[in-house]
Image: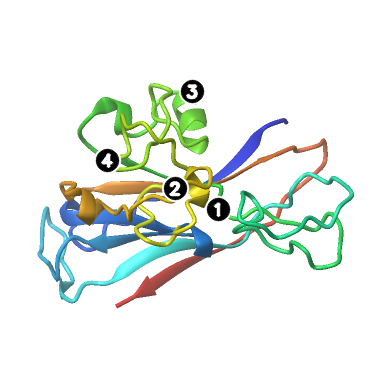
Amino acid sequence: LNDTHIGFFMDPDLGCSEDDLIGSDPARNLIYAVNSDDNDEDCIGNMGYGTQPPAFGVAVLRGPLMDANGLDDPVDNTMPAWNGMRFNDGVPDNERLGLSRAMYFLRDGNPTMTAPQVVADFMNYLHGRWKDGTPLTYGGSGYGGTTDARFAFPDATDPLGVGVGGSPQPAWSEASAGNIPGDRRSLSSMGPLTLEPGMYQDLFVALVYAR
C-alpha cells in the first residue's frame, strides 16, 4: 500500500459541545480542544464544566516508522524531521513520523467542511484537504485562502513556518480569526508511508487532559 496515511479521529465535546474551539501545537505533535470562554454552560442535555473548563487533546508520542532509506536522517526545520522522532541518533532507519497534518472539520455548516461521507472524503482529510479537494489554508477558517497549511490553528507554536513551507506567518488560532465556536472534530494524520505485505506499525497516542 503506497502513500498510506494513518489518522486518529477525535470528537472532544468538552461538556457542552456547542461552544468549543480547536487548536494544534505541531512541534509537540498535539491537537487539542478548548472552551471558547471561561464558563462552560449546560446544553442539549449535557452538563457543562462551569467555570475554568479544561482542555483536552491527542498527542502523538510515537508515530509510525518511516520508509527505510539506509540513512540516519538529520534533524532540521523541515518535515518530517522537525517534529519526528529518532532523527540523528546514530541508528539508520529507525526514524518515526510525528504529526504530519492537523486537520479539523465541523458537525454543521459549509458541507465541504463537514464529516466525511465517501472514500474520497476520508482520503482528502488525511492529506489535509477539504472534501472538494482544496487544501487547508492558513488563516480564517482554513478554507479558501491562498497559503497552503499543514496544521490547523497552530497559534504561535510554529514561528519558523514549517507547516507552510518555511515561510513564517502571524499567529493563527480560532479565537484570533474570530471563528464562531461550535461542535468541532479533529484528525491527527501521519504519513506518507509504505505498507508491505505482512508489515505492521505500532504507535503510541496519548489522550491528555488539563484543567
Q: Which of marks 1 and 4 is nearer the N terminus?
A: 1
Q: Is mark 2 on a helix, strand or loop?
A: loop
Inspect the image, locate mark 1, and give the three-letter code of the amino acid beneath it: Leu
Residue bearing mark 4? 141
Q: Residues within 10 Å of mark 4 (few under 14, many from 20)?
A: many
Q: Toward which corner of the image does residue 110 lie, by quadrant? A: top left
Q: Residues within 10 Å of mark 2 (few under 14, many from 20)?
A: many
> From this viewpoint, which residue is outermost toward the front?
167
Q: How far apart are marks 3 and 1 (CA)?
A: 21 Å
Inspect the image, locate mark 3, and give the three-letter code of the amino acid beneath it: Ala
Residue 182 horizontal/vertical position (percent): 19, 48
Residue bearing mark 2? 151
Q: Which mark is residue 120?
A: 3
Q: How crowded is mark 3: few (under 14 residues within 10 Å), some or many (20 or more)?
A: few
Q: Which of marks 2 and 1 is nearer the N terminus?
A: 1
Q: Distance between the residues labelled 1 and 4?
A: 20 Å
Query: Is residue 69 visible in the rendered structure shown here?
Result: yes
Residue 35 horizontal/vertical position (percent): 21, 63
Q: Toward which corner of the image does residue 19 lie, by quadrant? A: bottom left
Residue bearing mark 1? 99
Inspect the image, locate mark 2, and give the three-letter code of the amino acid beneath it: Phe
- For image coordinates 62% across by 50% down, the residue present is 78
